[in-house]
Image (cartoon, rainbow, N blue to C red):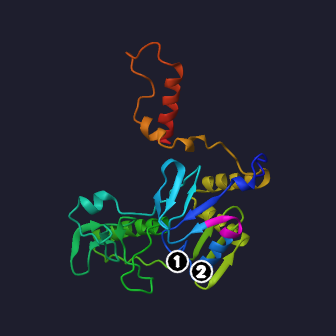
Amino acid sequence: MRSYPELSPAELNFHLVEARDRILPEVSDRPGQWVVRSLEKRGARVHLNSELVSARNGHVVLSTGEEFDSELIVWTVGNAANPMVHSHTDLPVDQHGMLVVRADLRVGTDAEPVPDAWAAGDDAAVPDLAADRPGAATVPNAQNAVRQGKLLADNIAATLRGREPKPYLHHSLGTVATLGLGRGIFQYRRLVIKGFPAWLMHRGYHVLAVPTWERKIRVLAIWLTAALFGRDIVSLASVQHPRDAFITGGEPAFPPSDAPSDAPADVTRDRGRAVLAGHD
């Protein structure tokens, strides 16, 4: 709003639609309720236990019967197994289409392992040995995937050398999330930190997680300049026609040589931008 003083706060509305009865399921109940209150205090509308039925022409219809218009719709989708895994393989899969994996990342069960087959990451239902409930699988996120990949390589090397593979065991160091600029939440067991300190913890964790010192310094430098001079506000004109990049992405950047010579000059330029946008 500070960057566009011609806009009025009354013109802006933010709706968050969630099919479950809570957002941020990684945190416990009370911190999750605080997150909802924090968003609503800043003017957001949080729709829990709601699903998107239709968004034709920007008119949003929810399963609860609520309706409203939206100029911009952002759809975030959860993880799912690759269709190649759950539909085109003879390896064992669970009810979610993910590969059945033992704790040592071998495909199969303890009673029926699949010889010389290993799996890790988002397509593998790796048992979560650190969880309190039996039958729980690890969360399909980057933290688990990176650690599982390293253990998978070590376990394959161990079996080739005649040693026993090790089971995957990872104790979570907590959950941290941002709720906008300068706001966040962190939870480790019963310890809960809210607001600006949690936001700083989130930024610090991500700097540490970025690989190589060169990239860490680049990311940190961008954040520091944004803190001094403000965030980079750019045009989002492409969101008005989000399908264009997919429709024209397969077309050649330049028209064929037998194209009419009187074709509009801007066609080639538009196609060029669409192709680049599609690859981007």
C-alpha separation, residue under disc 2 versus residue under disc 1? 8 Å
Question: Which residues make up the magenta segment?
Answer: 39-45
Residue at the image point whose x is 58% and y is 84% from the top: 189
Residue drawn at x 43%, y 68% as measured from the top left: 140
Residue ID at (51%, 47%): 57
| Count of numbered marks | 2
Please identify the quarter of the rendering in which residue 33 is found. Answer: bottom right
Give the structural element (helix, strand or loop) at label 1: loop
Query: In this rendering, does residue 207 appear at all?
Result: yes
Is residue 133 covered in magenta?
Answer: no
Q: Which of 16 and 279 is in front in this view?
A: 16
Q: Nearer the viewer, residue 154 or 94?
A: 94
> Residue 226 at what x, y percent from top left?
73, 52
Q: Is residue 242 left or right of residue 149?
A: right
Residue 113, given in percent of the width and then of the height, sits at 23, 75
Q: Image quarter for residue 159?
A: bottom left
- Residue assigned mark 1: 172
- Crowdedness near tag 1: few (<14), some (14–19) or many (≥20) residues, C-alpha within 10 Å: few
Q: Mark 2 points at which residue?
A: 188
Q: Where is residue 97 in the image (x, y as percent from the top left)?
A: 30, 67
Residue 201 visible here: no
The mark nearer the N terminus, 2 or 1, is: 1
Q: What residue type is labelled 2?
A: Tyr
- Viewer-proximal residue among 172 and 24: 24
Where residue 146 appears, x then y in whole percent?
Answer: 46, 65
Badge 2 element? strand
